[in-house]
Amino acid sequence: MSEAVLRTTLSARTTVMAALSYLSVLCFVPLVLEREDEFVYFHAKQGMVLWIWGVVALFSLHIPVLGGWIFGLSSMGVLVFSVLGLVSVVFQRAWKLPVISWLSDRF
């Protein structure tokens, strides 16, 4: 994982908003409220990609036989990347999650 260089003052509000980014649908709260803060916006974009991945994984349950496996693997991936994102917020870093950051840069 590489680390992005972002300039911001990290207050308690900034940290909380960045942490909300990795908690499912709550990723939209920082996207709307803290759009000016590049640290929060960076994490919110990655959180939104993880949320979209989770929603798409739900639709995979409609695939006979393989749907459960796809959903299980996708859920584990979302969980692992969400925990990595939360750890990066706690350490006040902007880790670029593999593939997730590439997708989030497209938004």
Image: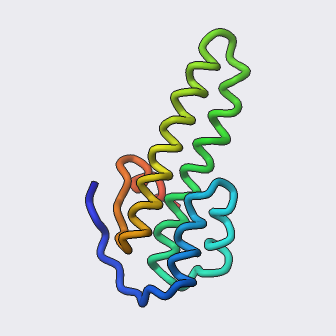
Count the marks. 0
Query: Of all residues shown, which one is farthest toward the top?
Result: 65
Image: 80 above or below 4: above
Scheme of colours in the image: rainbow
Image x and y of residue 24, in percent: 64, 54
Image: 87 above or below 32: above
Image: 1 above or below 9: above
Which of these two is toward me, 70 or 12?
A: 12
Residue at x 52%, y 43% (from the top left corner): 78
Image x and y of residue 73, in percent: 51, 28
In what quadrant of the picture does the N terminus appear? bottom left
Image x and y of residue 28, in percent: 67, 66
Quarter where residue 62 is shown: top right
Which of these two is toward me, 101 or 74?
A: 74
Residue at x 41%, y 87% (from the top left corner): 8
Query: Of all residues shown, which one is farthest toward the right?
Result: 62
Q: In the image, 76: left or right of 23?
A: left
Residue at x 51%, y 35% (from the top left corner): 76
Image x and y of residue 81, in percent: 45, 48
Quarter where residue 3 is shown: bottom left
Image: 24 above or below 78: below
Q: In the image, 81: left or right of 19?
A: left
Query: Of all residues shown, which one is farthest toward the left?
Result: 2
Q: In the image, 107: left or right of 60?
A: left
